Image: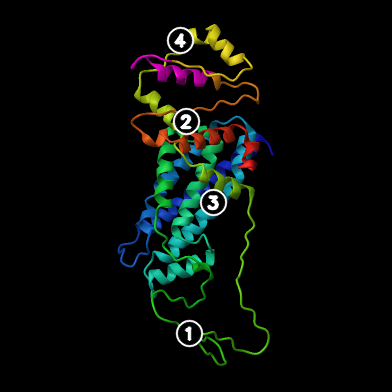
Amino acid sequence: MSGIGEASLVLGIISSIIAIIETTKQVYDAIEDEAGLPKNFKKSATKLPLISQLLEDAERYINTATDDSIKAAFTPTLEDCKFQAIQLKELFEKVMPKGSDSRWDRYVKAARTIGKKGRVESLVGGVLDDLQLLATRFPQVLTSRGKEKLENAIEEVANMEPSLPDGFEQMPAYAHYGSGAQNNNTGAGTQNNNNSAGNQNNGPGQQFIGTNHITKNVTVDDIDRSCLHDLRCPDTLAIKSRLKENKDKLLYQSIDWILQNPQYISWKCGGDVSLLWIKGGAGKDKTMMSIGLIEKLSFPQDESTVVTYFFCQNADYELNTLQAIIKGLILQLVNQQKELIEYL
C-alpha cells in the first residue's frame, strides 16, 4: 500500500473512532434522569472528551508523519481501540434510555453479551490503554500535557470499584445478587435443589462436576499492552518537558563547552563504564545542562545507541523511588529497542 493510502486508512480509522466516542457522549448527555444509572457510567462518561482530544492529537501526528512504517504500525492498535469503542457505544445505547426494565438489568444483560471485558470501566480503560500503547511506542503522538492527562485518566479508571461482580459473564440468564438462594427451572422435568449441607447429584446419563477453564487467544498487542500497563510509572519525557517549561529557557550554547571538554569526550566515546558528574550550587542550571546533554545525545545516531534517563526531585517522592527509576529506564529501553518487549 502506498504512503498516501496507508495514511488515509489510519486517518479513516481515527475519524471513525472519534465519531463513535462523540455519539456515545451524545447518548449520555441526552438522559434527563440519572436515577438507577449503574455504577461507573457517569465517571466513565467524563473520560470521553479526553479520548476525543487525544485521538485528534494522534490525527495531527499522522498528518505530519513522513515514515510510512509508523502509519502502518498504528493500524492494529487503532483497530482494537475502535472495536472497544463500538462496544462502549452499544453499552451506553442499551443502558441509558428509559425502558420497561431497569437500567441495571439491561446493563447486566448487555455486559454479559460482551464477555469478561463488558464492564463499562473495562471498556473505557481498554480505549485509554490503547492510546497509551500508541503514545509509548511513538512519544511524539501526544503532547506532554496530553500524556499527563492520559496517565491520570488511566489511574482513575483503574481505581474504580467493579461495577459488576467477578464472573458476571458466566452467570445464567437468571442472575441473583444479594443473600439467600435462587432456584430456577426454565424447562420441563424435575428440579431438586439442596440449599443446606451435603451434596446433591441427580439425573440420568453422564454428569461431570468440576472446574471450567476458559481460554482466550492472546494477541501480541494484548501482551504489549499488559506489559506496558505493568510498567506504568512517571513519564520521563513529560517530566523533562515540564522542567523545561518551569525553569529558565534552555540555551544550547551554554553546553557547547561541555561537548568539547576532553573529559566529556572521553566519557562519551570511551569503552569504560563510568559516571559523568556535574556538580554546582543551587540555581547554577545543572538541571537544564543535563536536559541539554540528554537531547544532544538523543539526536539520531546508529540503531545501537540508546539514551535513557530519570529525574529525582525533593518535592516529588514518587520520582525518587527505586521502583519508579527502574520502571522508567526499562520503559525507555523498550521504546527505543522494540524487539526487547518480548523479554518482558
Q: Badge 3: how crowded within 10 Å, few (<14), some, or many (20+)?
A: many
Question: Secondary structure under badge 4?
Answer: helix
- What residue appears at the point 36 percent right and 54 percent down from the top-left corner? 43
Label for residue 82?
3
Decide: is 112 above or below 194. above
Residue indicated by mark 1: 197
- In magenta segment, residue 191: no
The answer to whether the residue labelled 3 contacts the one labelled 1, judged by CB atoms less than 8 Å apart, is: no
Label 1 – label 4 distance at C-alpha: 82 Å
Residue indicated by mark 4: 253
Q: Badge 1: how crowded within 10 Å, few (<14), some, or many (20+)?
A: few
Q: Amino acid at mark 3?
A: Lys
Residue indicated by mark 2: 237
Q: Badge 4: how crowded within 10 Å, few (<14), some, or many (20+)?
A: few
- Choose the circle earlier in sequence order: 1 or 2: 1
- Choose the circle earlier in sequence order: 1 or 4: 1
Q: Badge 2: how crowded within 10 Å, few (<14), some, or many (20+)?
A: some
**Over which residues does the magenta segment extend?**
279-296
Label 3 – label 1 distance at C-alpha: 49 Å
Tell which of 94 and 286 is nearer to you: 286
Quadrant location of the N terminus in the rendered image: top right
Label 2 – label 3 distance at C-alpha: 27 Å
**Percent x, y for residue 339?**
65, 37
Label 2 – label 4 distance at C-alpha: 22 Å
Decide: is 31 above or below 81. below
Q: Amino acid at mark 2?
A: Leu
Q: Quadrant of residue 2?
A: top right
The answer to whether the residue labelled 4 contacts the one labelled 3, judged by CB atoms less than 8 Å apart, is: no
- In magenta segment, residue 287: yes
